[in-house]
């Protein structure tokens, strides 16, 4: 598990390399990230070479997504006469935020998504801005103004894939368009365990009930969220357990409660998600982490917090002394969790 933790703790190397027309290119770890802010047939990148492209949301990059990218990489390598560049086309924001009933809670940022796709085998990740004008494209225009300019010679999708305005396009139409425009279409297989296919929905359901171990089994790694340390009421410091209050969190949080957690690059800690009923009458959700054996100023820093295990539900105590005693027991339990994991 130490190697996994070290891999998760590595800082994302993300820097702007070029802006050409409608494309911004970043380097994220070993994968190249291209943000597509519009759709135009003249957009040629700064990408290079012909591509094999998997299309999807890939939120969380769970084991099922990783399986797809491995299949894609194998397909790209088998291409004749020249191997293709294994790439992923994904969308931001989530399409359901624009054309659906609302996006589900996000499991990953675009940068994390790209990095994990790179670890799975993708070389390039194209992130298309999903807005009303993009959603209005016909299936043919989607292919001609987005897929073809990305150098696609092979496309990999799921069997229920739909695209274009009103989800009018399906796999059969994509294959027909590919036959006319010079790319092949491949339907990837599904990866599953005894509980069924791996899916982002399974991860969200596990997090919603506080089962971070089940979420990790689907993800193939522990769930991580990130946020900025802001000034709080300093209640933890008054109790002898200073905490970093984390705000501006983009990723889904687990069910409220107390968790053992790792703060990347800093140390192990005890995380509390809830409303602090014993010491605060507020109904505003608080996310705070006490980092074990650490003293320092973290205000303004971005923390990446990795969920190790759930310790208990949040509860109201009869007195502050009872709360302090429980926090001490939580710290002992957390230390035990780190030894096990």
Image (cartoon, rainbow, N blue to C red):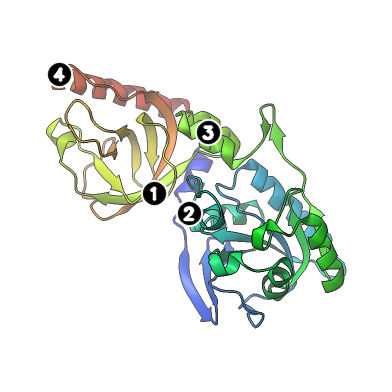
- Residue 328 sits in quarter: top left
Whole-percent x, y for residue 212 in the image: 48, 31
Q: CA distance from mark 2 to mark 4?
A: 40 Å
Image coords of residue 105 (percent x, y): 47, 45
Measured in 3D between alpha carbons, the distance from the residue under mark 3 to the one under mark 1, in whole angstroms, is 20 Å
Number of the label disc, if any, that sits on residue 109? 2
Mark toward the viewer: 3 or 1: 3
In the image, is 268 to the left or to the right of 175? left
For residue 104, above or below residue 125: above
Specify whether residue 261 is in view.
Answer: yes
Judged from the image, the secondary structure of the residue bearing numbered disc 2 is loop
Instruction: Using a 10 Å C-alpha cutoff, classify the residue at mark 3 as few (fewer than 14 neighbours), some (14 to 19) or many (20 or more).
Output: some
Q: Residue at x 23, y 39 (%)?
A: 243
State which tag comes first along the sequence, 3 or 1: 3
Of callouts 4 and 1, which one flags the residue occurring earlier in the amino acid sequence?
1
Sequence-first tag of 4 and 3: 3
In this picture, is 81 found above or below 21?
above
Q: Which residue is mark 4?
A: 319
Mark 2 or mark 3: name the one nearer the start of the chain: 2
Q: Which mark is residue 226?
A: 1
Left or right of 254: which side holds 54? right
What residue is pinned by disc 3? 205
Q: Is residue 149 above or below residue 258?
A: below
């Amino acid at each position: 598990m130490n190697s996994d933790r070290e891999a998760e703790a590595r800082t994302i190397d993300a820097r702007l390399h070029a802006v050409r027309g409608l494309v911004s290119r970043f380097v994220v770890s070993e994968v190249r990230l291209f943000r597509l802010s519009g759709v135009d047939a003249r957009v040629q990148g700064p990408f290079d070479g012909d591509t094999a492209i998997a299309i999807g949301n890939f939120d969380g990059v769970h084991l099922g997504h990783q399986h797809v990218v491995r299949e894609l990489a194998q397909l790209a390598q088998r291409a004749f006469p020249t191997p293709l560049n294994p790439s992923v086309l994904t969308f931001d924001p989530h399409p359901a935020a624009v054309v659906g009933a609302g996006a589900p809670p996000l499991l990953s940022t675009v940068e994390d998504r790209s990095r994990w796709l790179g670890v799975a085998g993708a070389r390039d990740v194209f992130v298309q801005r999903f807005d009303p004008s993009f959603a209005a494209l016909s299936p043919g225009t989607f292919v001609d103004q987005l897929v073809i300019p990305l150098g696609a010679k092979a496309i990999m999708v799921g069997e229920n894939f739909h695209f274009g305005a009103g989800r009018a396009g399906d796999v059969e139409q994509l294959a027909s368009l590919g036959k006319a425009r010079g790319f092949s279409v491949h339907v990837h297989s599904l990866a599953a365990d005894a509980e069924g296919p791996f899916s982002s929905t399974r991860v969200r359901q596990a997090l919603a009930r506080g089962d971070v171990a089940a979420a990790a089994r689907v993800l193939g790694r522990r769930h991580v969220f990130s946020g900025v340390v802001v000034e709080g009421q300093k209640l933890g410091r008054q109790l002898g357990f200073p905490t970093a209050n984390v705000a501006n969190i983009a990723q889904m949080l687990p069910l409220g409660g107390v968790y053992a957690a790792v703060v990347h690059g800093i140390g192990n800690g005890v995380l509390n998600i809830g409303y602090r009923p014993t010491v605060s009458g507020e109904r505003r959700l608080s996310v705070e982490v006490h980092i074990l054996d650490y003293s320092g100023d973290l205000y303004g820093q971005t923390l990446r917090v990795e969920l190790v295990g759930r310790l208990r539900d949040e509860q109201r105590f009869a007195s502050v002394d009872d709360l302090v005693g429980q926090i001490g027991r939580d710290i002992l339990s957390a230390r035990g969790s780190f030894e096990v994991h």
